[in-house]
Image (spheres, rainbow, N blue to C red):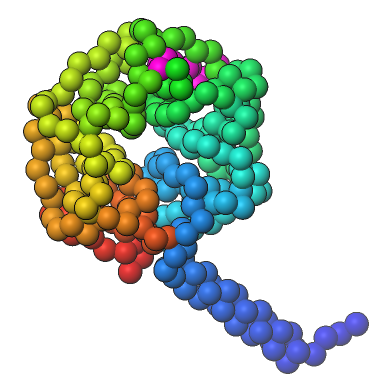
Amino acid sequence: MNQNPTTITSRTLCLLVLIAAIGCLQSIMANAPGQWSNTTAVTTLNGRLYSIETNGALYQTDLATGKWIQIGKAEFGNTRYLFADGQNLYTIETDGSLYRINAATGAWGRLGQAGEWQNTIGAVAIGAQLYSLEAGGALYRTDLASGKWVQLGKPEFSNTAFLFADDQNLYTIEKDGKLYRVSPADGSWSRVGDSEWNDTIVGAFLKGRLYTVERDGSLYETNSATGMWKQIGKRDFAKTDYMFATGDSLYTIESGNLYRVNPITGAWRAVGA
């Protein structure tokens, strides 16, 4: 059957208009306020933000533009912890099981035995090794290739409030506000500086510096070698829910909004604005 060329042209035009409208809508949605209101876990991999929402969806966000896409199916509603090595994403689920996730497709598979990380209260990765703290105070190192784990040192971390890592060491802030450096080789630890971080609500490492936000909204930069700290910028960060770092910038999620923060001045701007 022969088709009218005018009809084909009209249909093509309608299709192009529809594609343009969808692209415009996606752009608006990517930069709309509150896009991360339902976020429950975040990590970064290769300069991109990966986040999990309350409905179990996994998203990848371009931190230059704020545009996001969903990765795979909404299968991550039971995730407690989300982290990454240099290639893959990983989760620890509410049942204590550890999973490796393909960051491109969302496909996932379990590592180790089911439920082995059930008592985990904190987890960070250095390279291809996961370091996790248990409720009883034990520190474990897990090989992310095999899922095999080993305990490091004595169970001395039952009072840990925060666990961080740079490229070489672990750091903890204890419930009494003291900062400690912890060896990832044997779990030995030593206090860093004489200051206290009693009011810390979030923190992240960037280029050897620990950045923390206090309850009054202050942002602090701490020299991880000496423990010396200084305030950065104004008290603008009291509503921060998440803080992370990649490249040369800090990022925060506050009331569902994503911001890029200059670590030198404390100046901030909505991502994608």
Tell me where residue 21 appears, x and y as whole percent. Answer: 56, 79
**Vertical relation: 171 (above or below) 230:** above
Q: Quadrant of the N terminus?
A: bottom right
Q: Is residue 154 left or right of residue 261?
A: right
Membership of 233 in magenta stretch: no
Image quarter where the C terminus lies is: bottom left
Q: Which residues are magenta?
A: 137-146
Q: Nearer the viewer, residue 203 or 6?
A: 203
In the figure, 195 relative to 77: above or below? above
Side of 5 where 252 appears, left or right: left
Front residue (pair 22, 96): 96
Which residue: 29% across, 23% down? 170
- Please report the residue visible at 54 percent of the width from the left and 34 percent of the height from the top: 91
Residue 220 visible in the shown view? yes
Q: Position of residue 169 (x, y in %)?
A: 27, 22
Residue at 41% x, 55% y: name it: 62
Q: Where 59 falls versus 121 (above or below)?
A: below
Q: Quadrant of residue 109?
A: top right
Q: Does 140 lie within the magenta span?
A: yes
Q: Is residue 212 left or right of residue 20?
A: left
Q: Closest to the observer: 232 or 168?
A: 232
Spot the residue most to the front.
176
Residue 130's spot in the image, x, y percent? 44, 23
Give the residue displayed 54% in from the left and 51% down from the top.
Answer: 53
Residue 143, x across and y down, in percent: 48, 17
Total marks shown come to: 0
